[in-house]
Image (cartoon, helix red, strand yellow):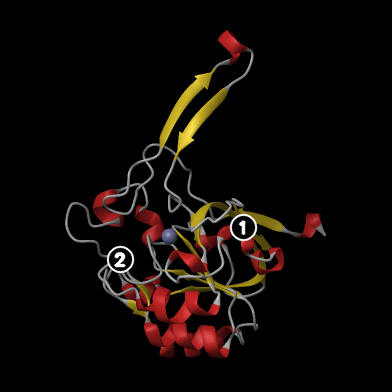
Amino acid sequence: MLESLNVVDLTQPLGPDTVMWPGAPQPVMQTVLTVAHDGFYNRLVTVVEHTGTHFDAPCHMVEGGMSADQIPPDRLFRPLAVIDISAELDGDPDGVLTLAQVHAFEAAHGRIPDGAAVFLRTGWEEFNTDPARYANAPGPLRFPGFGAESARFLVEQRHVAGLGTDTLGIDTGAATDFVVHRQISHPRGVWHVENLQNLKAVPPLGAWVVVGVMKLVDGSGGPARVLALVP
Ligand SMILES: [Zn+2]
C-alpha cells in the first residue's frame, strides 16, 4: 500500500519568519541546551496556537465547541477534495468560492464524499513568505476565502469534517464578522486548517488527508503537520 502512495506535505515551515495574522506575535525559538555544552539540543518555542499551517478547533469561535484534544482521531483522517479556483480568482484578494463553483467542481470531478475534508486553493500559497502579498501588509487584511453559500452547502449537504485553505483564514481577509467560522462550520463541529501549501500537487478527488494537530488540552487549535496521501 505504501509503495502506491505519494505523500504530499501541505505544511509551511514554522519559524521566526512565518507570516502571521496581523498583530499576532512572531514565533520565538530560544535555544536552551546545546549538544556541545549540555549533551542535548533543546529549544523553548513560543507560538500562538494559530501560527503557520494550523488547526482551528470548533471552540476557536464557538463557546463550548470541541477543543483540539477532543477531536476524535477518525475526524483527522479523511477523504480529501481540493477545489482550485486560482485561475478564476486571478489574484482577486476579495474573491470567494461560490456555490456555482462547487457544483461545477462536482460536475467535472464527481460528488464530494460525505464526511470529506475540502481544501480551497486560491493560489495564495505562492505568496506565503511575503507579508505584502500574503496578508496585504501593512494595509488592511485581504485574501480570498470560502463564501457563506458554498460553505453552507459543504457543511449541510456534504457533511464535511473539515475545511482548509492556502490563505490566513477560511473567511475572506476583509471579513470582520467571520460568518463561516461563527455561523456555519464551527457550530457543527467542523474544523479548519489554514495556511496550507502545495495544494497544486493534490488531485481534485481521490486523495486522503492526515491532519496531525498537536493534542493541546483545551486548545483553540494548534500548529499541524498536514499530509495528503495521493494514490
Ligand atoms: Zn486559525
Q: Quadrant of ligand 1?
A: bottom left
Q: How many marks?
A: 2
Q: Quadrant of residue 149?
A: bottom left
Give the residue type at disc 1: Asp
Find residue 143 and name its label: 2
Cα distance between the residues tagged 1 and 2: 29 Å
Q: Quadrant of residue 147?
A: bottom left
| In the image, the residue with mark 2 has its CB under 8 Å from the nearest atom of ligand 1 | no
Q: Which residue is mark 1?
A: 69
Disc 1 secondary structure class: helix
Please report contact status of discs 1 and 2: CB closer than 8 Å, yes or no: no
Q: Residue at the spot x=24%, y=52% of the render?
A: 132
State the image coordinates of residue 133 (x, y, percent, origin top left): 27, 55
Work out whether residue 166 or residue 23 is closer to the camera in this orientation and state it.
23
Compared to residue 27, the image places residue 54 above or below, namely below
Q: Is residue 133 left or right of residue 87?
A: left
Compared to residue 16, the image places residue 39 above or below, namely above
Q: Earlier in the sequence, mark 1 or mark 2?
A: 1
Mark 1 neighbour density, 10 Å: few (under 14) some (14–19) many (20 or more): some
Q: Is residue 93 left or right of residue 13?
A: left
Mark 2 neighbour density, 10 Å: few (under 14) some (14–19) many (20 or more): many
State the image coordinates of residue 26 (x, y, percent, origin top left): 35, 41
Q: Is residue 95 left or right of residue 7?
A: left
Give the residue type at disc 2: Phe
Q: Residue at the spot x=83%, y=60% of the render?
A: 1
- Residue lying at the far top of the rendered structure: 37
Q: Residue at the spot x=26%, y=73% of the render?
A: 94
Q: Quadrant of the C terminus?
A: bottom right
* Residue 5 in sight in this render: yes
State the image coordinates of residue 81 (x, y, percent, origin top left): 58, 74
